[in-house]
Image (cartoon, rainbow, N blue to C red):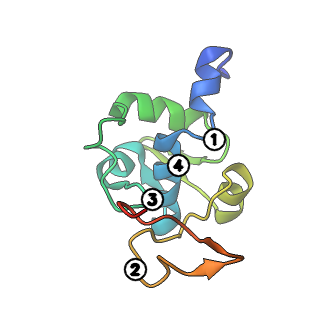
Amino acid sequence: MRKLEGRLSRRTMSKQNDAIKCAARYLLDKSTPRTAAECFEHMTFKSGKLYRISARATTLRRLESRMARHPILTKHNTNPKTYTCTLEDYEEYFDCDPFYDYTDQTVKNKQSHDKPSRRVKNED
């Protein structure tokens, strides 16, 4: 496969690409090679919501194409195509913690340096 260029490259390789982030987090969690179809079926956002049922979700074929070209995913077999991701590659490429639990209620309102660690939904 040739390297993507131009507008497609910026969208596919973007650090804000939710599809690749969710797939990489799923691969980190499983730690064994998985197919793109299996990733698409089970990957979630950090909040726990399934990626495939969100309004921002891409199609399975587009995800397969992006996973095949993305630099942080390592391709293992070709039939079927399986991928893995390492924690070092994820942390180097994306600027977020892959294992941060947004549903954890104990750290919701902790104060650090007079600022909340994150804003609670529907609170002023």
Residue 120 relative to residue 38: left or right: right
Residues tagged 1 and 4 counted as in contact (Cβ below 8 A): no
For badge 1, the amino acid type reads Lys
Mark 4, residues whose alpha carbon is within 10 Å: few (<14), some, or many (≥20)? many
Mark toward the viewer: 3 or 2: 2
Instruction: Report the Cα–Cα distance between label 4 and label 3.
Output: 9 Å
User: What residue is shown with label 2?
Assistant: 105
On the question of residue 1 being in view, the answer is no
Mark toward the viewer: 2 or 4: 2
- Residue at 72 percent of width and 76 percent of height: 113
Instruction: Report the Cα–Cα distance between label 1 and label 4.
Output: 8 Å
User: What residue is shown with label 3?
Assistant: 26
Say whether disc 3 or disc 1 marks the residue closer to the N-terminus: 1
- Specify the quadrant of the image occupied by residue 106: bottom left
For badge 3, the amino acid type reads Tyr
- Specify the quadrant of the image occupied by residue 14: top right
User: What residue is shown with label 4?
Assistant: 21
Q: Position of residue 29 (x, y in %)?
A: 47, 67
Q: Position of residue 60 (x, y in %)?
A: 34, 34
Q: Position of residue 48 (x, y in %)?
A: 34, 62
68 vs 26: above or below:
above
15 vs 46: above or below:
above
13 vs 115: above or below:
above
